[in-house]
Every structure is written in structure tokens, then in C-alpha cells.
């Protein structure tokens, strides 16, 4: 428990200090906001290192061994399931709200034209295809450094520590809520949900906690099955790399709490379903971890 308190105190303290400083200096409109938010993703891993040093826990199991043998299917799931869920969620949203679907990508084309760039239909199609290929095939690898920064903390350290104390399902639930709350200051600045909605920013923070639970259940299941944080980092990178593809086809007023982005209830319906399944499967064994002072390892969960 002491190690967990130290880790969470550091992770929340450092992250929130940086994000509140950003808020005081223009928030998301600050030209360095993207750089700051990218750096923030590395903080959980840094806090794991500091915690292990402070508590003399050591680094025997940092969760970085890939354990490929017998686990390739989980790496494939990590790589391809998030883009599939994002695509299906957006498809369902546009079927329900066809007025928001723009096959000509006119909104994106107008943005390119405003920058003095060519925005013909052929050009926009080429940009879309290139972005999709990058997001699907390269995104998980390009994003893995920053997503590892989070996953070493949340799935590699927090999750197994919780599983020493409670069941797998409770650990996944608690870690998902913590992961969502960790985003609170940046959500309060309008990230993902904007600010022009009832109960802002608390409604957005709550919605982020809900999304983090379902997405975290999927990532936690991959971690438990492989005893490695690498699949979770790949899956997290796949989410980040593909999340905004529906923006190309969106026109008119939309609610981020609904869709088409995966943080909405319809756009994220795939994560709700798959996350629920993973949450159920992760609880099928009563004692999912073994632990000692320097090593935490997951048992196989059917």
C-alpha cells in the first residue's frame, strides 16, 4: 500500500502541476500545449522509477519483456482491435445521424484551403488514405514511446499492485477510475469534450472516467494475459493513432458525449462491449497474481 500511495501521489502531483501550469498559460491554445501533453504521458513511468528507488523495490520485473511465445494473438488484438472498434463506432454513429456524415470531406477540405493548400477531391482522398494507413500500420509503433510512459505506470505497476489486495475485476475497475481521473485537469480545459455543455467540466471528467474504465479493461486484459505492458502500449498507441479518423467525414453540430469519436457513448460502443467482455474474462480466476517484494507476475486468466 505504501508503494501505491507514493506512486499515485507522484503521478497525480507532477501531472496536475504541469497541467494546471498549462491552464494558467493559455491552456490548449498555448502553442506548446501538444508538446506539454506529450511529455505528460511519460510522467507515470517516471514515477514508477522514482517509487521503486525510494522504496528500494528494485527493477526485477518492469513489465517490458515481450513474452511473444504463445501470445502473438494478443499482440494482434492490441494492434488491430482498437482501429476496428473506432471504425465500427463511427459507422454506427453516422448510420444513426446521417446528417453529420459528409463523404466529400468538405470541412477538412476547407481547412486545407484556408492554409493555401490544394484540396481537390482526389487530393483529400489521398490524404485520407495516407492518414488511415499511417494510423493503422505505423501509429502503434510511432506512439509506443509515449504510450509506454503511461502503460508502465497504469497497467505495469498500478494494476498488479491493486491485484495484490483485491480481485482482478476490482483492480481493473479501480485502476480505470484512477486513469480517468488522472486526465481531469486537461479535460477541464476542454480536451475531448470541449467546454460548452451542461455541468462542464464535471460531466466531461465523468465521461472520461467511464471511457477509461472500458478502454482500460481491454488494455488490462492484454497485460494480464501476456504478463507484459507492451501489448497495452501497442493498443493504446493504436487508439491514439486512429481515434480521429471520423473527423474527415464529420459535418454539422455533434455532441462529443455521443460521437462519432470513441470517447462518445455511440462512437465508443465497441470499447464498451469489448471492455465489458475483457472485464468479465479477467475475473474468472480468483487469484490472478502472485507477488513478493520485488516481483509481481500475472497468472493466466482464461
Image (cartoon, rainbow, N blue to C red):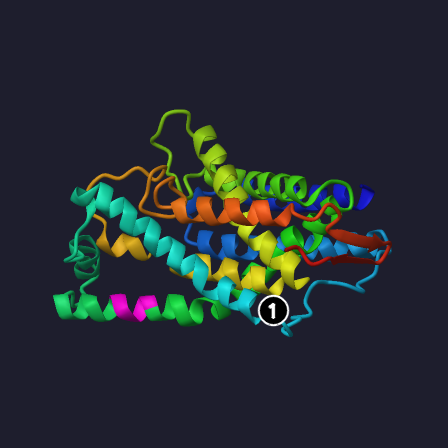
**Residue neighbourhood size for the residue with mark 1, other residues' Cα within 10 Å, grouped as few (<14), some (14–19), many (≥20):** some
Magenta residues, start to end? 128-132
Residue 175: name its quadrant: top right
Q: Main secondary structure of the magenta part?
A: helix
Tell me, yes or no, if residue 42 can be seen here.
Answer: no
Q: Is residue 228 above or below residue 174?
A: below
Task: Identify the residue under disc 1.
Answer: 71
Q: Tell me the residue at 77%/63% (across/down).
A: 61
Tally of numbered tags: 1
Q: Where residue 53 sits: x, y (%)?
A: 82, 57
**On-image quarter of the C terminus:** bottom right
Q: Is residue 179 left or right of residue 292?
A: left
Furthest residue in direction bottom, as rendered: 69
Mark 1 secondary-structure assignment: loop
Q: Where residue 57 sits: x, y (%)?
A: 84, 56
Residue 127: name its quadrant: bottom left
Q: Tell me the residue at 22%/46% (across/down).
A: 95
Q: Where residue 168 sits: x, y (%)?
A: 68, 45
Inspect the magenta stretch and tell me whether residue 151 lies in it.
no
Q: Where residue 56 sits: x, y (%)?
A: 87, 56
Q: Is residue 32 left or right of residue 111?
A: right
**On-image quarter of the N terminus:** top right
Amino acid at each position: 500500500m505504501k508503494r501505491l500511495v507514493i506512486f499515485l501521489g507522484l503521478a497525480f502531483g507532477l501531472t496536475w502541476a504541469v497541467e494546471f501550469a498549462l491552464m494558467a498559460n493559455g491552456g490548449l491554445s498555448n502553442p506548446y500545449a501538444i508538446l506539454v501533453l506529450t511529455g505528460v504521458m511519460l510522467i507515470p513511468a517516471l514515477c514508477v522509477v522514482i517509487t521503486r528507488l525510494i522504496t528500494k523495490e528494485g527493477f526485477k520485473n518492469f513489465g517490458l519483456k515481450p513474452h511473444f511465445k504463445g501470445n502473438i494473438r494478443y499482440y494482434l488484438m492490441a494492434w488491430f482491435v482498437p482501429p476496428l472498434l473506432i471504425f465500427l463506432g463511427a459507422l454506427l454513429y453516422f448510420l444513426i445521424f446521417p446528417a453529420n456524415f459528409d463523404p466529400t470531406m468538405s470541412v477538412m477540405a476547407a481547412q486545407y484551403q484556408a492554409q493555401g493548400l490544394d484540396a481537390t477531391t482526389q487530393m483529400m482522398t489521398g490524404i485520407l488514405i495516407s492518414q488511415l494507413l499511417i494510423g493503422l500500420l505505423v501509429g502503434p509503433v510511432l506512439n509506443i514511446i509515449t504510450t509506454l510512459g503511461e502503460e508502465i505506470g497504469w497497467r505495469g505497476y498500478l494494476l498488479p499492485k491493486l491485484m495484490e489486495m483485491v480481485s482482478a475485476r476490482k483492480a481493473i475497475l479501480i485502476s480505470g477510475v484512477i486513469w480517468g481521473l488522472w486526465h481531469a485537469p486537461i479535460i477541464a480545459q476542454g480536451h475531448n469534450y470541449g467546454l460548452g455543455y451542461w455541468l462542464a467540466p464535471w460531466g466531461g471528467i465523468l465521461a472520461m472516467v467511464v471511457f477509461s474504465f472500458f478502454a482500460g479493461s481491454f488494455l488490462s486484459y492484454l497485460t494480464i494475459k501476456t504478463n507484459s505492458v507492451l501489448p497495452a502500449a501497442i493498443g493504446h498507441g493504436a487508439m491514439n493513432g486512429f481515434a480521429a479518423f471520423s473527423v474527415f467525414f464529420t459535418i454539422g453540430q455533434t455532441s462529443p458525449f455521443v460521437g462519432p469519436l470513441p470517447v462518445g457513448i455511440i462512437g465508443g460502443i465497441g470499447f464498451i462491449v469489448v471492455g465489458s467482455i475483457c472485464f468479465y474474462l479477467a475475473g474468472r480466476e480468483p487469484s490472478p497474481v502472485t507477488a513478493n517484494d520485488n516481483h509481481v507476475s500475472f497468472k493466466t486468466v482464461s
